[in-house]
Image: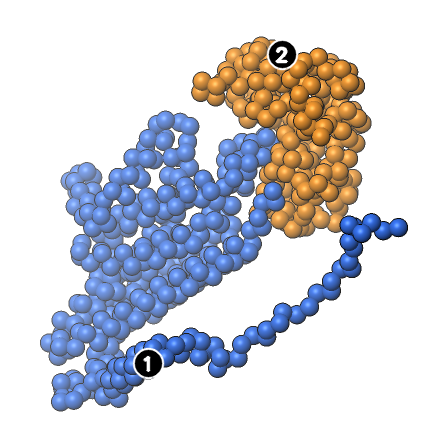
Amino acid sequence: MTDPAHLTAPVVPARRPPHGAPGPLARLKATYFPTPLQGLLTVVLGALLVVLLARLADWAVVGAVWSPADPAACSADGAGACWAVVAEKHRVMFFGAFPYEEHWRAALACLLIIAAFVVSALPRCWSPHLAWLWIATLALALWLMLGGAGLAELSTSDWGGLPLTLLLSAGTVSLGLPLALVLALGRNSTMPAVRLICIGTIELFRGLPLLAVLFMASLILPLFLGEGVTVDKFVRALVGMVLFFGAYAAEIVRGGLQALPKGQYEAAMSLGLPYWPMMITVILPQALRIVVPALVNDIIRAFKNTSFVAVIGLFDFLGATKASLQDPLWVRHTLEAYLFIMAVYFAFCWAMSRYALWIERRIDTDRPSHAP
Amino acid sequence: MTAITMNQVNKWFGALHVLRDIALTVNQGETVVVCGPSGSGKSTLIRTLNALEPIDQGALTVAGIRLDGAEARRQVRRRVGMVFQSFNLFTHLRVIDNLTLAPEGVLGLSRHAAEARALALLDRVGLADQARKFPGQLSGGQQQRVAITRTLMMEPEVLLFDEPTSALDPEMVHEVLHLMEALSREGRTMVCVTHEMGFARNVADRVVFMVSGSIVEQAPPDRFFDAPQSDAARTFMAQVLH
């Protein structure tokens, strides 16, 4: 009956893999003591690390001076880190020359901006409506920072410290991103004039150092505007930052536009969608999703770049700290103050880069592979 | 009534002459299958019919509109539906939103009317329970049926299919061909580029055979398959039928 060359077998039922996960001890051994030589290295480096950490702890915690009551204590023999300088100067570091009794306004503006960034970071909130959130946030923040309508009036020359840094970052990103979209789309335009203007803008600002852009904005812009017209120093810095950020972000957005399969454009066109509806409903939502991690990277850079404005006489977080350390009582303890603001900068940037990693994974799982 | 007229149409990609003196008429209600070896220009031909590829010479009239200029292109695209090899569903939108996007944006239907039309059509193609899913959650065959439904949403006068089953696993080809056959039976005007010779034989009213950018044979399917006139057609058939 059956042909001996025709073999049959039942389906084999699925089984567990043979090895369970290795225990923590086994993993530790495999990582740190795989061979005697590597084990020795682990011991030597480990001992070195312990000694260094102990000395660091001794300086930063055990021998540290915390209370600003007596500046001389910091200079005493055997004294460790002088954190007292931060306790003494933190208001000036954070808020610069902003009037002391109005600090709450600046702090509130900071919180608003941070909240707007957090909301914008959530994928479920991604929609063109974010524009309204940012208009509202910036309007409120400006009202808090400038006063009027019931609040004491201030000017941008009173601004300083972290609020200035955050306002510059928020302004750069919220104005720079729309600019980047326009530049990226314009660069792909079929209209030669539009394309040339966009390419020119992008290449000009990508080809200049940020410092040069800031000098240009602060020194050359007033020349063009002519006698008598003065543009606020903050606005000039912001214009420079926005153009610089926009040029870089435009190239990132363009990368996203190119990464999108051509079929998405063709499907939209074949349904009769005109250019703008196609871009807004089909192309940009997908293209931007692809480049969010790269954009976050650029936003981190824009945040750090705000410290450049010190060169045109604005006192951002770094600048305000530097200014606060002119006090002869504390001038010998600038290291601790700089370490502290380094930690603050790091906290912001690290949070953003962790977010970029998270969103990258999230987008990968969100985006189903194209079937064929 | 003619739905499509191509008169002495020529097209070049650089120096490459991809469409050569194409003359083709498709009547309303007719199903035409375009076949030929790869590189023969059949995809380019079908893509000129809704202006995804512009032509360099000749005259092209689709759904009563002479294709020249941007306005004519817009009008033609509203009246002509296109189904692609790789489906090209909008991956960031749910099935239902893929379907309602153009009817709302181009035809001006209300959200309510567009959804009602979408659900009725999904029901017809047997995908009513998939409306809230994302394209990536569907099988290839289901995605292609959604893509066909998306073109039907616009109530097109002409349907174009560009190798609609070439990207599908073999077991899913059938469900797509079945739907295409049903559409042909209800009298829609269809132009299909496909390698499915069974479909061509059973469903098409006419087979158009292309070689090197030229139409070398046009015949009813039984004539074409049983008595091909050119060597190229005989060679082609020997290759695809085995």
Tell me which colouring the rendered structure shows. by chain
Q: Is residue A192 left or right of residue A118?
A: left
Q: Residue at x 71, y 40 (%)?
A: B170
The image quadrant of residue B236 is top right
Q: CA distance from mark 1 to mark 2?
A: 83 Å
Residue B235 disc label:
none
Task: Give above or below for A132 relative to A38.
Answer: above
Q: Secondary structure at mark 1?
A: helix
Q: Is residue A9 left or right of residue A164?
A: right
The foreground one among B155 and B42 is B42
What is the x, y in percent for residue B222?
79, 19
Residue furthest to the front in view is A4
The x, y position of residue A366, in whole percent, is 56, 54
Q: Circle 1 sits on which residue?
A: A40
Q: Residue at x 57, y 48 (%)?
A: A369
Give chain B's shade: orange
Chain name for mark 1 = A
Chain displayed in blue? A
Q: Nearer the viewer, residue A303 or A150?
A: A303
The image quarter containing residue B127 is top right
Q: Are marks 1 and 2 in contact (CB under 8 Å)?
A: no
